[in-house]
Image: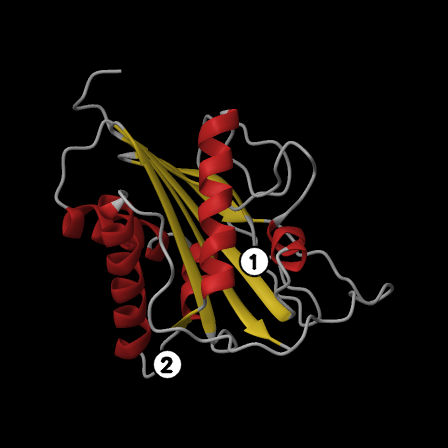
Amino acid sequence: MHPLILILTLILLATPFVFPQTPLEPSTSVQEIAVVQEEKPAELPQGAIADEPKPIAKTARPLPPPPPKKESVQTKPTFPPGDSLSFLLEEKILVFTNTERSRRNLQTLEPNTVLASTARMHSADMLARDYFEHENPDGCSSSCRATNAGYAWRMIGENLYMLEGFDFSTDETAAMIVSGWMESPGHRANILKEGYTETGVGVIVKGSAIYATVLYATPR
């Protein structure tokens, strides 16, 4: 791929992703017991942005009991050594996200280490197995991954972003990711949802490729 070619892809889908020939209208829905906000693709000048599908209700089968109570809010997420660019992007995405919320007098989101680790692992998995979906090839969605990681949630949502061939500063890249989400109704709804109180940002960078996953949640 030419280094100046930019592919911006934000998808909130629970079904296999196919780039449409024409933009799709968003379809937003919210779920209180188990909220998964996801989207179908629509086109932007720099790439494809997605809308969200309907959430999956989990009222029929209770979730497994939560793990022993742990401190859920951390000021700094743990981060693998030697990956400073990813760490800086994660910090900046959180800053720009909370800036958008503060402008609208919404509570800022607190970083959570379990959510951050879960998001980072999904970004790494998408890169390693060459896919870009909310549901991984094993059929595990964002809510599934958070539950498996031991995070007891009441509501949860996820935004994804993939970029290749970039040549921007850290601030420019993070700002572009958040502004791209803010221009998509479903992604914007996740960022500005009043019920969410915690978040986890996970970014993986390899060469000129960036995979970003952000989880938004309300704990039980």
Residue shown at 50% from the left, 60% from the top: 115
Residue that extends furthest to the front in the rendered view of this protein? 81
- Badge 1 amino acid: Thr
Residue shown at 54% from the left, 37% from the top: 133
For the residue pair 83 and 191, the one nearer the viewer reads as 83
Residue 20 in view (yes/no): no
- The residue under label 2 is 106
Provide residue 107's location: percent of width, then percent of height.
38, 82
* Mark 1 secondary-structure assignment: loop
On the rendered structure, is 41 left or right of 98?
right
Q: Residues within 10 Å of mark 2 (few under 14, many from 20)?
A: some
Q: Earlier in the sequence, mark 2 or mark 1?
A: 1
User: Residue 219's quadrant in the figure?
Assistant: bottom right
Residue shown at 51% from the left, 43% from the top: 122
* Mark 2 secondary-structure assignment: loop
Q: Are marks 2 and 1 in contact (CB under 8 Å)?
A: no
For the residue pair 10 and 150, the one nearer the viewer reads as 150
User: Residue 112's quadrant in the figure?
Assistant: bottom left
Quarter of the image containing the C terminus? bottom right
Q: Say the numbered circle drawn on residue 182.
A: none
For the residue pair 211 and 79, the one nearer the viewer reads as 79
Quarter of the image containing the N terminus? top left
- Badge 2 amino acid: Leu
Residue 49's place in the image compared with 7, above or below, is below
- The residue under label 1 is 28
